[in-house]
Structures are given as C-alpha cells and as structure tokens.
Image (tube, grey):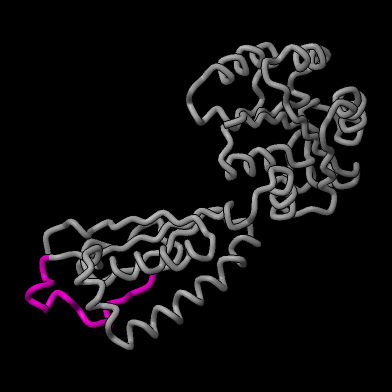
Amino acid sequence: METQFFIITGISGAGKSQAIKCFEDLGFFCVDNLPLILIEKFVSLSAASQDNRFKKIALGIDIREGENLTDFPRIISNLALRPRILFLDASDETIIRRFSETRRKHPLGKIVPEAVKTERTILSDIKEQTSKVIDTTDMNLQELKETIAGLLKISQKTEMRITAISFGYKYGIPSDADIVMDVRFLPNPFYVKDLKHRTGCERKVKNYVMSFPETKKFARVFFGMILSIIPKYIKEGKSYLTIALGCTGGRHRSVVLANELKEYLSKKKFSVILKHRDADKAG
C-alpha cells in the first residue's frame, strides 16, 4: 500500500484545524503543530514502519513555528516521502471576521489586520510550493470536507462509517446510537421451543422472523428510509452513523434485522460494521 502524505498549512483562521479534523475522519494519522526539526525523523520512521496507521499521514504546520519556517523548503526536500502540501487561505475580511466571532487571539499576538498582513508575507514562499490552495472564504465545513475527499478521490459512501447494532432493551439502549428502532412488535422466536435458545444469526431463527409479512414490510420501509436519510447525514458533515435495533433480550429479532440491514446497505455499496451486543447473553 502506497503511503499518502499530506502537509496542511495556511493562514491562521482559514480552517487548517478543521481540515486536519477532516483528514482524521477520513482515516489519516494526524499530528498538528509538529516541530519542523522533528518532521524528518517522524517521516523516516513512518516510511520504515509496517504499521498500517502510518500509510496515511497528515501533518499540520503553521505560523507558530516562527523563524523556523525559513527551513521549511530544505526540510521538505530532504524527506524520505514526498508530501502533497495543502495551503488553506481566505480573504482578509473573512479571516478578521472569524477571529472576531471566536474571540481568539492571532498567533502573532498583533492586531488581527496587521497580523494577517505579516503572516501572508512570512508564508508567501511556502504558499508557492503548495500542491493545492484551498480558498475557504465561502466554504462551510461540509464543503471543505467534500473538497478534501475529492482530492483523495474518496466517495461519500466510503467516507460514511455505518454501524448496525442489535441490542436487548432489558440491558439498556446503546449510548452511542444515532437511530434507535424498536422491533419488539415482530413475532418472537423466544416462544418457539426449538428456537428459544438459538440466536438470530442461525438460519432457522432468521427464516422464522422473516417469514411473516409484517417483518418483510417493516424491513422494506425501514431500510428504504435509512437509505434515503444517509445522504442527509453526510451533507451535514457526519462521518459516523450508528443504527441500533432492539428487541426484548437482543438475541432473536434485533439480530436478524441488524444482519438484514447490513446486507441491504452493503449491496448499496456502503461499508457497514455489524455488532450483536447482547446475543450471547443468557435470557
């Protein structure tokens, strides 16, 4: 697997920190404000490592490095891996407004308009070396994320990490659930002697639960609804979605439906993690 290596820099207030968070959401190992003198060692160790975490790395560098930034061109040219450099920028008016809204001090410690002018001068040489300048003047967070995903050629479906989890209400609702669906209205295999001590991962239990018209209708309607709202979550910048399906004990109906949901979304090219929280608990 070829290593992907990005350096993210730019004007303070242009969105560098948000960009780094976007890279983290996309599976990158990120380090913000790593001292320049440590970059060569970090990259060398990453290049030699067999750990897959270091196959996708992103480093944040900014004006806080001060005078050391003059060494940036030399350090970059000596790296074991050649980085793609992204430079975040925005109009002066936008930068000044953002600092005013957040009430943050500029890293240079000056009046913001003066600091922005000085910072542009200091970073001008670095900006000329960049692979891509991203102007965030009129961007929201989701648009920034889509821009970065586009650079990485990552589709929104790949970006969204979906977890389907089955659970038993008698043990409590999963605390990290975004969507909770109660399937206790469906026919219960618990009352079928041959199925009582089995789980929804077994074919006999699945066949029983899915044999009822109300189950088939529910699955069709609920799964279709989930499919229709996933793009809305993506548009709002959400990278993780946990869908919890619960029945009384979490062994039968919820397990079957969680399995069915995973299969359904997988066919739609989504990546789904499946968890059965309570399936092995004694009823």
Residue shown at the point (62%, 29%) measured from the top left: 3
Q: Relative to 119, does residue 138 appear above or below in the rendering?
A: below
Quarter of the image for the N terminus: give it.
top right
Would residue 281 be found to the left or right of residue 142 on screen? left
Quadrant position of residue 38 = top right
**Residue 215 visible, this orientation:** yes
Residue shown at the point (78%, 14%) measured from the top left: 77
For the record, the magenta segment spans 180-197
Give residue 274's position: percent from left, percent from top.
37, 56
Would residue 259 be found to the left or right of residue 189 on screen? right
Quadrant position of residue 247 = bottom left
Give residue 36's position: percent from left, percent from top.
70, 15
Residue with the most extreme bottom position: 213
Would residue 280 be found to the left or right of residue 178 on screen? left
Q: Relative to 20, does residue 263 appear above or below in the rendering?
A: below
Q: Main secondary structure of the magenta part?
A: loop
Give residue 26's position: percent from left, percent from top.
59, 44
Camera-side residue of 189 and 29: 189
Give residue 153's position: percent from left, percent from top.
69, 47
Quarter of the image for the C terminus: give it.
bottom left
Residue shown at the point (28%, 63%) measured from the top left: 167
